[in-house]
Amino acid sequence: MTDLITYKPIGKVKSIYKQPAGTPIQPNNGVQPGEIEIYPEFQDGLMDLDGFSHVILLYHFHLLKNTSLKVIPFMDTTEHGIFATRSPARPNKIGLPVLKIVKIEHNIITVEGIDIVNNTPVLDIKPYVPQFDTPELSEIGWLENNYMKQKDMKDDERFL
């Protein structure tokens, strides 16, 4: 067993979603706006972020109670290893969406495409840089025949 790792949230998500049920399963399911509220002591870290169109957000699935190494993901009916899915039932309960920046005012980042429950703790923010973050894709495994399903799918609480 390794040492315990702890993180201090730098802020929280503000969204219309009050519970996981009914929340989109991917951030590109639409243009639902939301906000990332950065705590005042971290606000200086936002300097120059307004020059980017998107951010990578790291957050903690704070409402998730169960984890599993094998899951039946939202877009399939077959069990897969957790690391071959984007299921929230991960050992470390970390979410990682790419969100479009609409504007930044003081300590509030307004974003589009939110798929996160209100008051979710934010762990970190990084600028999305296509030249670094978009490798040439060649294979997407079991998702090849299923990825289009995400547009109509919502969280059904199977991972709580």
Image: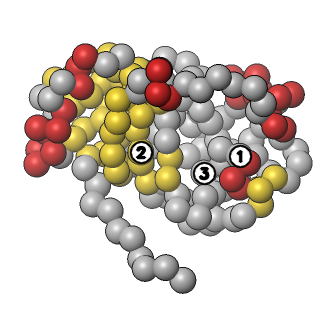
- Whole-angstrom CA distance, mark 3 to mark 1, is 9 Å
Q: Position of residue 1 (x, y in %)?
A: 54, 83
Q: Position of residue 94 (x, y in %)?
A: 49, 53
* Mark 2 touches mark 1? (CB < 8 Å): no
Please identify, in this view, whether the residue under mark 2 or under mark 3 is nearer the observer. Answer: 2
Residue 126: numbered disc:
none
Query: Disc 3 marks which residue?
Result: 88
Residue 58: numbered disc:
2
Q: Nearer the viewer, residue 86 or 72?
A: 86
SS state under label 1:
loop
Query: Disc 1 marks which residue?
Result: 85
Closer to the chain start, of discs 2 and 1, is 2
Quarter of image, res 108: top left
Q: Is residue 13 left or right of residue 10?
A: right
Which amino acid, by three-letter code, is at mark 3? Pro
Q: Is residue 121 left or right of residue 160?
A: left
Local crowd size for mark 3, using a 10 Å CA cut-off: few (<14), some (14–19), many (≥20): many
SS state under label 3:
loop
- Whole-angstrom CA distance, mark 2 to mark 3, is 13 Å
Quarter of image, res 42: top left
Closer to the chain start, of discs 2 and 3, is 2
Which residue sits at x=29%, y=55%?
A: 9
Q: Position of residue 95 (x, y in %)?
A: 50, 46
Please identify, in this view, whether the residue under mark 3 or under mark 1 is nearer the observer. Answer: 1
Q: Position of residue 8 (x, y in %)?
A: 27, 60
Task: Specify whether residue 32 is in view.
Answer: no
Which residue sits at x=62%, y=36%?
A: 25
